[in-house]
Amino acid sequence: MPSMLDAVVVGAGPNGLTAAVELARRGFSVAVFEAEGTVGGGARTEELTLPGFRHDPCSAAHPLGINSPAFRDLPLDRYGLDWVQHELPMAHPFPDGSAAILSRSVAETAASFGPRDAGTYRRLIEPLLPHWDTLVRDFMSLPLSALPRDPVTLARFGLVGLPPSTWLMRRFRDEKAPALLSGLVAHVIAPLGGFATSAIGLVFALAAHARGWPVARGGSQAISDALAGYLKDLGGAIHTDYEVKRLDDLPPARAYIFDTSPTAVARIAGLGRYYDRFRYGASVFKVDYALDGPVPWTAKEARTAGTVQVGPYRSDIGRALNAASREGRGPEAPFLITVQPTVADPTRAPAGKHTFWAYGHVPNGWDGDLTDAIERQLERFAPGFRDLVLARATAGPPELAVRNANYVGGDIASGAASGLQLLLRPKLSLSPYTTPHPAVYICSSASPPGPGVHGMSGHNAAKAVWRRLRAS
């Protein structure tokens, strides 16, 4: 190791690894230090239930990963990353056995919403979709780390996206489109009436239409392992089982980049109360299942979908989110986000068996058990589900916080995605990756563009770092 490194990265999640890769490929010397025994952060794969059943403890489906400008610029396929698409990216079933779908086809998706709303959806999506690649690059670089590539489309998107999602839903006349789009907003655990929540729903919908809603073959660990393999080939070093409690625990470097919570950055770097106003949001209660067969969804569309949202209606989703984020209680009828990777990737389970997970939203730090409520919801839309369960592994906020130190109080979004903090995080600043310490930066999901396995927070932070290193 050189006597003085150009950069040290603390935390080997997707953002930390991406930041390290971006610097290493530009000729800087980089080392990564990770407290856990393996790299991965929120993109790991483990045998949580039974031997041979490979589960993703956190992130499992990756619409933002396959669309990420950072990942698309890297040769991750050469390091084992293979995106696997389900026949349908997403389904959203209803009690009558029908379903709304999010398909690669805008027309097919619109048709699933019914004749009164099909045209509305197409008029909303079709003008934006041809500009998606520049739009997503601009959107995921906010606050702007570069001039917009397509300011006209970004402004048009902002006019629709900045209002609350409840305003967007007024365009529709029936229940199916608002239900599916409200479910998309809930993926970042944002109350439906919050600022810019329309943008969340639109980004997820556009991402699915552009490139699907895939899983990584073999598990989400493949994303982290591909980044780590590329980094090592670039000359970067990775040190695991290395807990950092203060800057003095690290080797001398010109820059220190933290893929950690703002709370941890402040503690380790001695920033005092700098991030005290940063808000952590609601959490989730997650159950990973080993199943004896595929989930017996009543709606046929759900049987081939990678992700299935279980609501069913916008009002139900809103109540469940409010219970978790505003009322401080676990919902009686949780809104569920579920993923069934083995429908398209049988490598994750023994022959004929399946892995499946579901989570519902609960308050930050909640120590209750949502298992029965989750399974009651699943039985409504997949009768006989419980009969297929071979084993289950549960994780509420306390377990999630132990598993990943960035999930403060079990907040898997690494910070409340509400109010101005949805876009301007972790501080109200045009330079969100810098800190009062001139050599210390933050690159976790607590910084823009926020939660998800896409590496863009790491990419954007690395850009701020290499500009300073080259100027010094």
Image: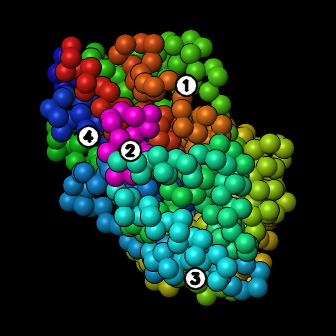
Side (left or right) of 385 relative to 234 = right
Inter-mark Cα distance, 2 to 1: 22 Å
Q: Which residues are magenta?
A: 134-149
Q: Is residue 208 above or below residue 369?
A: below
What kind of secondary structure does the magenta stretch mostly adopt? loop
Residue holding disc 3:
111
Q: What residue type is disc 3 on? A: Ala
Residue 348, picture quadrant: bottom left
Closer to the camera in the image, 180 or 123: 123
- Looking at the image, can residue 406 be seen? yes
SS under mark 1: loop
The percent coordinates of residue 424 (x first, y second) are: 54, 32
* Labels 3 and 2: the sequence-earlier one: 3
Return the residue at label 2.
151
For residue 428, the mark is 1
Residue at the location (44% across, 61% down)? 128
Q: CA distance from mark 3 to mark 4?
A: 42 Å
269 sits to left or right of 339: left
Q: Say whether disc 2 or disc 4 marks the residue closer to the N-terminus.
A: 4
Report the residue at 69% width, 74% height from top. 176
Up-down: is 176 above or below 334?
Answer: below
Mark 3 or mark 1: name the one nearer the start of the chain: 3
**What kind of element bears circle 3?**
helix
- What x and y, as percent, mark residue 52? 46, 70
Based on the picture, tell me whether residue 275 belongs to the magenta stretch.
no
